[in-house]
Image (spheres, coloured by chain):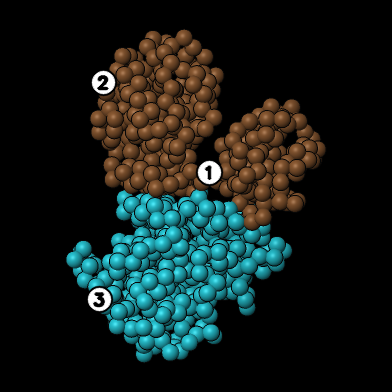
Chain colours: A cyan, B brown
Amino acid sequence: MNQQEQASSIDEVLSSIRSHQRILVTSHLRPDGDAVGSILAMGMLLRAMGKSPEVVLADPIPVLYRGLPGANSIKSVADLDSHVDAAVVLECDSIGRTGIQALAGHPIINIDHHASAKRFADVNWIDPSASAVAEMVYRLAIAAGVEVTPEMATCLYTGVLTDTGSFAYEAVNAHTFDLAGKLTSKGALPGRIAERIYFSNPESKIRLLGIALATLKIDSGIAAVFLTHRDMESVGATDADCEGIVNYAIGIDGVRVAMFLREIENGRYRVSLRSKGDVDVAAVAERFGGGGHKNASGCTIAGPLDSAVKTLMEQVRPLF
Amino acid sequence: MNQQEQASSIDEVLSSIRSHQRILVTSHLRPDGDAVGSILAMGMLLRAMGKSPEVVLADPIPVLYRGLPGANSIKSVADLDSHVDAAVVLECDSIGRTGIQALAGHPIINIDHHASAKRFADVNWIDPSASAVAEMVYRLAIAAGVEVTPEMATCLYTGVLTDTGSFAYEAVNAHTFDLAGKLTSKGALPGRIAERIYFSNPESKIRLLGIALATLKIDSGIAAVFLTHRDMESVGATDADCEGIVNYAIGIDGVRVAMFLREIENGRYRVSLRSKGDVDVAAVAERFGGGGHKNASGCTIAGPLDSAVKTLMEQVRPLF
């Protein structure tokens, strides 16, 4: 999509916003930093435009993001006021991904930066060149003539920071830094935000990482780490504490594919797959009913652990 | 130092460079990404100015930075041509810090961005507002009218990235992002560079991290982790594999001070200290003959391990 088409999509989004008053803002299940930061900024933007936004998430807000400006006013689905006129949905490929079935039938504005974005809504603004959906919300604020406050800048910076792996992913370019610089000028504090996200880990998370790394196995460029129920309990760990563990395995020199398995229920394991370069692990995840991106995907698989790892290894080995 | 004083320092540096031909370029012992990246870029800058630079390091180049453009042409002290006319010394507070005693008596240009910088040289350009010495080398290139090539941009970006902890430290501001954006426009590839630095860890480093985290102790906001000789040997780990381990301990919510001890020789331990906010661990390191910055310092201490940890805890506890 060229610049002109982008501009016309932004116009459509703004005109749809202007024609509604009570607007629900939401994002996907298991929300990440970009989802939480961007819906909060979107809510502020709508308020600045004179609208009455309802910022809602079906899943709980991860602890890391509960300190964001306005985070404590995010509603759960149970608290949801059903009298909304329209909804802005950020980086979801369907209504289902929001976890809010009540949205069906409402006018929906879909804003997404994923390559896998779907045009499922009434208004669809899709820009895979954006490093985070936060970047699109920023552009919307500029187009709407809304002043970016330090609170908005903080929320948007959090989105950019977390969705680029702290400026480490392939998608990072001069635009990303230009945006980060602008948000910093508007009042985002990079050191403070990074400290909150990367240096405020629960003790259980760090202990869990130690346990997981002790299980590391590497075979012909494929690395595996895992955690059992018992491991989780031994340090009082939560689901969120598992986030990022797979990155330690893929971050090893010579490793092309990494898998992290963790026991969930009924002897099943949740699997995170990561790959480097051209190795496509989404295809493997899909074979087990999961999905994702080429370099990052997930699925669940039946245990016992040994046979699950073996089965996955067999599926991964022919990839490279 | 104001902008005008900075500009006059840059002029002095350039005029000193112009009056010499064979110029040695070096940085400190135990070089980090900013040291290696910046001396390489400085060498390229001097070559572009028609000079004959000798890029030298007294200590070996860490594996992570051996892939940088020009890294394989960095000389060791043994290979050093003694007929140099002058030396550019990056971020050292004395000739001793370079590990190259032969520099004494030569005209020296000292470029440093540390608050603790010393004016020990003939020409001294000090700017503590720079997030990395790479930022100063970039400004020098611009002032000299030298085109920043993709190779220079790659080296300088590596300096900025590593010296800001991937844009996470307090010192990061809009200038830092402006520079990162410019370097990216000049050909630095942020994703590629970050992958090389953060996702090409030796297997031994990841295994060592697991072992260290299993030793984690936390008491009243003070965290300690440690490694013995035997731990290091069990996974074939090197000194460099220990880098960053202390950050996992300081990165725990509620931890104000973290220490990482590792056995070196004669029953002694090398200690890395980290703190958050106003807690000054440099003072503690100094009491044991070490030093550093307020939030990051180091020293060595006699074992056995238990009493070393106890002694350090006693010194740290009154700090907050």
Tell me if residue A149 comes above or below residue B178 in the rendering: below
Q: Which residue is mark 2?
A: B50
Q: Which residue is mark 3?
A: A12
Q: Helix, strand or loop at disc 1?
A: loop
1 and 2 marks in contact (CB < 8 Å): no
Identity, as a three-letter code, of the amino acid under mark 1 = Pro
Q: Residue at x 36, y 22 (%)?
A: B13
Q: Is residue B241 visible?
A: no
Give the label, 1 or 3, closer to the camera.
3
Disc 1 is attached to a residue of which chain? B
2 and 3 marks in contact (CB < 8 Å): no
Disc 3 is attached to a residue of which chain? A
Q: Nearer the viewer, residue B284 or B218?
A: B284
The quarter of the picture where residue B150 lies is top left
Numbered circle sitting on residue B202: 1
- B241 relative to B106 in the view: left or right: right
Disc 1 crowd rating (10 Å Cα; few below 14, some 14-19, many 20+) is some
The quarter of the picture where residue B89 lies is top left
Q: Helix, strand or loop at disc 3?
A: helix
Tell me if residue B8 comes above or below residue A21 in the rendering: above
Tell me if residue A274 comes above or below residue B7 in the rendering: below
